Image (tube, rainbow, N blue to C red):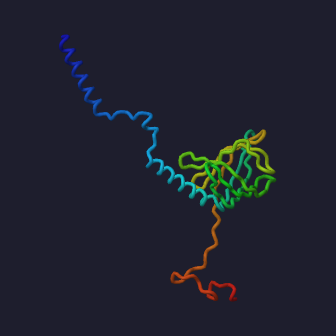
Amino acid sequence: MIAQKIVRTAAALVVVAIALSLVPPPIRAQEAATPTATSIEKDAAELTARIAELEKSLTGAVLVGHFTVTGRPGGDRHEERYELGDVKHLQGDMWLISARIKYGDHDLTIPLTLPIRWAGDTPMICVDEMAFPGMGTYTARVMFYRDHYAGFWTGKDHGGHLFGTLEHPKQEAEPAAVGGQPPAAGGPADETSK
């Protein structure tokens, strides 16, 4: 009886040993944390592409939406509008954004140097106790994704949410080219000849 238990236990141990030999060894934490030159180059290329895409998406865009003030009855939504001019990546997390800001009684155009950080493929403006000329000091997190924005803001003694869409005004169309050539001076596209 004891011999049968020993044989069954030995057989079970052999099966477990064979199964474990088929499982790849775990990656050591040090090996997993060490990036390769290829992965660093790929990450840098992806970041460069994301930066270019964000500059293109935000330059000339208009953020149209609402903000709320926490604690007010019914959500108390207010309209807001941010008309962006040039949006340029400076270095690191810092960006220069020319913006016309319209909410409540405020309507001003100012250049803003703001940090934008990435959560995966999603850019997020992150400001902490930042003074905005003519408006006050704010902390905010505002993310952008698929022509929408959403976030949280807080001022001196109040705060809330903000959300809306990015609108891209249509660019004026270039005069149509004929046969791959630009219109000739004095031709149908030349308004000065009228």
Q: Residue 1: in sight, yes or no?
A: yes
Spot occupied by residue 177 in the image (x, y as percentages of width and height): 55, 81
Query: In the displayed structure, would residue 105 be above or below residue 186?
Result: above
Q: Quadrant of the N terminus?
A: top left
Query: For residue 138, what is the image quadrant?
Result: top right
* 143 vs 131, nearest the viewer: 131
Q: Among all residues in the image, which is located at the extreme front?
A: 37
Residue 48 relative to residue 24: left or right = right
Q: Position of residue 140 (x, y in %)?
A: 69, 44
Q: Position of residue 73 (x, y in %)?
A: 75, 41
Above or below for 193 versus 5: below
Q: Quadrant of the C terminus?
A: bottom right
Residue at the location (78% across, 40% down)?
156
Residue at the top extreme? 2
Percent across and percent down for residue 112 are 71, 53
Q: Please name the residue shown 76% across and 53% down the image.
A: 103
- Which image quarter: residue 84? bottom right
**Residue 21's quadrant in the figure?**
top left
**Closest to the observer, 142 or 148:** 142
The residue under the point 76% across, 42% down is 155
40, 155: nearer the viewer: 40
Q: Is residue 47 above or below residue 182?
A: above
For residue 160, say whether it is visible: no
